[in-house]
Image (cartoon, helix red, strand yellow):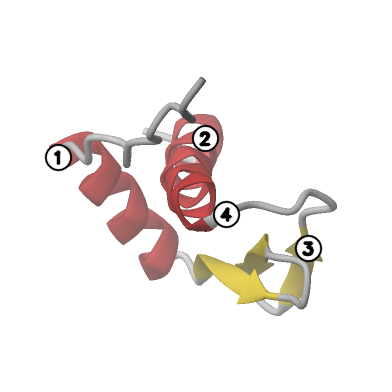
Amino acid sequence: MPKKKQKFAQVTDKHQKAMQWCINNNIKVGVKPTKKGLKVEINNNGSVKVSPNIYNNVEACNKVWELYLYLYNNYWKV
């Protein structure tokens, strides 16, 4: 049976707004390459946390957008 092709997440205006808010608040989410694959890294004003999971390109990209939304939804205050 052939592998199911993974798709990149559909990036919306909300994703863009979440990313802009995070960057303005000195929170950066990115991808860190390792020998086994990719890990996702959150840099919150110098405090760096790296995911324990290994991702492929598509999974890592989707996780980055997911984390931007998570951070925005949980820490943005009106």
Sequence-first disc among 2 and 3: 3
Give the percent coordinates (x, y) of residue 33: 65, 76
> Residue at (52%, 35%) from the top-left corner?
70
Whichever of labels 1 and 2 marks the residue nearer the N terminus, that label is 1
Q: Amino acid at mark 2?
A: Tyr
Q: Residue at x 75, y 71 (%)?
A: 48
- Give the Cα distance between marks 3 and 1: 26 Å
Q: Residue pushed farthest top? A: 1
Name the residue tied to disc 3: 49
Numbered mark located on residue 71 in the image: none
Residue annotated with mark 2: 70
Q: Which residue is mark 4?
A: 56
**Outermost residue toward the front in this view:** 1
Mark 3 or mark 1: name the one nearer the start of the chain. 1
Q: Residue furthest left?
A: 13
User: Counting other residues with Cα less than 10 Å from the Cα at mark 4, is it few (<14), some (14-19), or many (20 or more)?
Assistant: few
Q: Which residue is mark 1?
A: 13
Q: Position of residue 31 (x, y in %)?
A: 57, 68
Q: Which amino acid type is marked by label 3?
A: Lys
